Image (cartoon, rainbow, N blue to C red):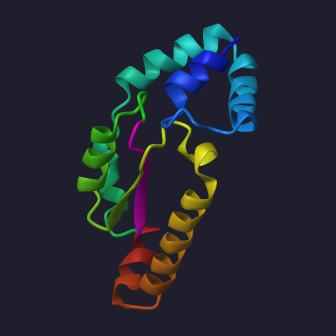
């Protein structure tokens, strides 16, 4: 039922393996319409920009697909701009399901983040990082 929606709204390049579309479709099909409707209302009103200050010294990356229709890339740029220690990671031609669409590239970004966090933990910044946590 949801496969056309998943492919159109969730996948950036639209050239996604059928197994990825099947998995995302199964997840959507298992979610009630009431839950989806409630989530969309919450998503519209959700704004935690003020809370980001608590993460200011934490090595972070903001990940998005360049073709995400549900959470446009401009939102990710705003979040990254509010996090001085953040690195913006935009995966070209990926959509809202970037983690499923481009797992290897996402894993590389996570690996880079972990190395940066380990490095930060062994420097003077690391002391500030430990205080923040």
Query: Taking 62 as reference, is 65 above or below it?
Result: above
Q: Magenta stretch: residue 60 in it?
A: yes
Horizontal side, residue 93 vs residue 45: left or right: right
127 sits to left or right of 22: left
In this picture, residue 84 sits left or right of residue 109: left
Quarter of the image with the N terminus is top right
Where does residue 131 sit, x and y in percent of width and height? 41, 74
Q: Was residue 61 drawn as part of the magenta stretch in this picture?
A: yes
Does residue 119 sit above or below 2 in this rendering?
below
The boundaries of the magenta stretch are 59-67
- Residue at horizontal 76 percent and vertical 25 percent from the top: 26
Where's residue 59, x and y in %? 41, 69
Tag count: 0
Residue 82 shows up from this direction:
no
- Residue 121: x %, y % from top left: 47, 84
Residue 66 occupies which quadrant of the picture?
Answer: top left
Q: Position of residue 114 (x, y in %)?
A: 54, 74
Q: Is residue 57 among what the camera can see?
A: yes
Residue drawn 50% across the image and 65% down it = 109
Looking at this view, name the residue that lies furthest to the bottom.
123
Q: Residue furthest front?
A: 15
| For residue 32, above or below residue 96 | above
Residue 64 vertical position relative to residue 86 in the rendered view, above or below: above
Front one among 58 and 87: 87
């Amino acid at each position: 039922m949801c496969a056309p929606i998943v492919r159109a709204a969730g996948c950036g390049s639209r050239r996604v393996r059928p197994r990825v579309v099947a998995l995302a479709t199964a997840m959507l099909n298992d979610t009630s319409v009431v839950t989806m409707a409630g989530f969309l209302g919450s998503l519209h009103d959700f704004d935690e920009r003020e809370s980001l200050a608590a993460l200011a010294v934490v090595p972070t990356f903001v990940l998005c697909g360049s073709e995400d229709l549900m959470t446009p890339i401009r939102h990710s740029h705003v979040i990254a701009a509010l996090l001085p220690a953040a690195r913006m990671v935009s995966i070209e031609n990926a959509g809202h399901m970037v983690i499923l669409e481009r797992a290897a590239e996402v894993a590389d970004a996570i690996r880079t983040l972990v190395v940066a966090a380990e490095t930060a933990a062994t420097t003077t910044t690391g002391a500030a990082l430990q205080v923040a946590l």
